[in-house]
Image (cartoon, rainbow, N blue to C red):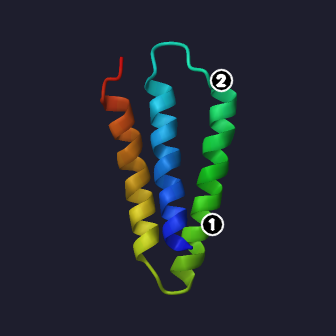
Amino acid sequence: MGWLGALLLILAGYGWGARLSSRAESPVPLPAMLLLALGASVLGLSLVIRAFLEGQDGPLVTGAVGALAAAALAVFTSRE
């Protein structure tokens, strides 16, 4: 379950970075995207913390670093 949490963190980071970097109007409004990203982040973080407490440290590190990297990738890559 920890790796599912890491995937949720990475997807939430990428989604939030993509929404913030979009110059045109997005079909998903900003408050809805904020709630979606926040929900995925909380669920993902709880899963990776549970895995960490059970002795797996890979999902926590991968999820945290991956979310930051995915958000930066989404912001700094141009999609027009």
Q: Residue at x 45, y 70 (%)?
A: 59
Q: Read off the residue under disc 1.
A: 46
- Quadrant in the picture for the C terminus: top left
Q: Which mark is residue 80?
A: none
- Quadrant in the picture for the N terminus: bottom right
Q: Position of residue 67 (x, y in %)?
A: 43, 51
Query: Can you tell which quarter of the image residue 72 is in?
Result: top left
Figure check: 31 above or below 64? above
Q: Residue at x 49, y 86 (%)?
A: 55
Q: Position of residue 23 (x, y in %)?
A: 45, 15
Q: Position of residue 4 (x, y in %)?
A: 53, 65
Q: Secondary structure at mark 2?
A: loop
Amino acid type at circle 2 is Pro
Amino acid type at circle 1 is Ser
Figure check: 14 above or below 54? above
Question: Residue placed farthest to the top in the image?
Answer: 24
Q: Residue at x 33, y 39 (%)?
A: 73
